[in-house]
Amino acid sequence: MRKRTAASLAAIAALSALLVGGLSGPALAHEERTVGTFHFAVGFGNEPAYTGEENSVQLFLHDAQDRPVTNLTDTLSVEVVYGGQKMTLPLEPDFEVGEFGTPGDYRAWFFPTQPGDYTFHFTGSIKGQEVDESFTSGPTTFSSVADPTNVQFPVKEPPVSQVASLTQRLSARLQEAVAGQQRAQDSANSAKTIGYVGIGVGAVGLLVGALAVAMSRRRIVAPLAPQGVSAERRG
């Protein structure tokens, strides 16, 4: 009976130690690597990672004695790579020693918008040591980004890429409609302008015609006056 009790207590103690160690250490789905005199554990801050949700590059940084590095400055940055697209982000501490978080936990926040594998490329230096390391998501490293449709309930929302594509198409159609309306308005304005010009030309024509008639009448009347005077003199 005592042997069974001792064995049970030993098993409970071992399980407790395992749980405590798991809770205090980095996430299991992170890729761990020794980089010079430092230890990196890299992955997404929230795993599994889904498109359209805020996430982060997460770096647990420890020294050669497995002590968390808590004084990393802005000498290290991370480049998020997806396909041929790249974006460089600063690393920020997600902790305050003695206050909150896990010491050595650094983040670079972003929103992944496409499913698939992402690469986190760290460049710069740590306490004078140069760093140039890349970590890529996958089955043996850390979580790739997934489409959340399969786990959405009760209503499935369209993927971010689909919404963006629809928005672009609607925007293009709206711009085309506005341009068409503007062209129609311009045509209407041109027609009005032509009409006004026609009216003006017509008015000028009438005025010129009236002047021409008046001048022709003056030419006819002017020669008759002297002839009348000559006749009176002859009489």
Image (cartoon, rainbow, N blue to C red):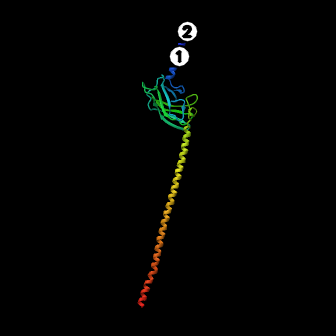
Q: Mark yes or no: residue 146 visible.
A: no
- Specify the farthest residue to the front: 154
The answer to which of 65 and 231 lies nearer the viewer is 231
Of 119 and 27, the residue lying toward us: 27
Q: Residues within 10 Å of mark 2 (few under 14, many from 20)?
A: few
Spatial CA span between label 1 and label 2: 16 Å
**Residue at point 45%, 81% (across, down):** 221
| Screen quadrant of the N terminus | top right
Q: Give the class, few, some or many, for how many residues have Cα within 10 Å of label 1's Cα (few <14, many ≥20).
A: few
Q: Is residue 188 above or below residue 25?
A: below
Image x and y of residue 129, in percent: 47, 29
Residue 98, by quadrant, is top left
Q: Amino acid at mark 2?
A: Lys
Return the residue found at the far top. 1
- Place of residue 187 in the rendered image (x, y in percent of width and height, measured from the top left): 52, 57
Query: Which kind of residue does numbered mark 1 sit on?
Result: Ala
Measured from the top left, where is residue 94 in percent x and y? Answer: 46, 29
| Residue 162 visible in rendering | yes
| Image spot of residue 64 (x, y percent) | 48, 23
Mark sitting on residue 3: 2
Q: Secondary structure at mark 1?
A: helix
Q: Quadrant of the C terminus?
A: bottom left
**What residue is shown at x 43% (from left), y 85% (from top)?**
226
Say if 89 sits above or below 213 in the image. above
Q: Dot 1 corresponds to which residue?
A: 14
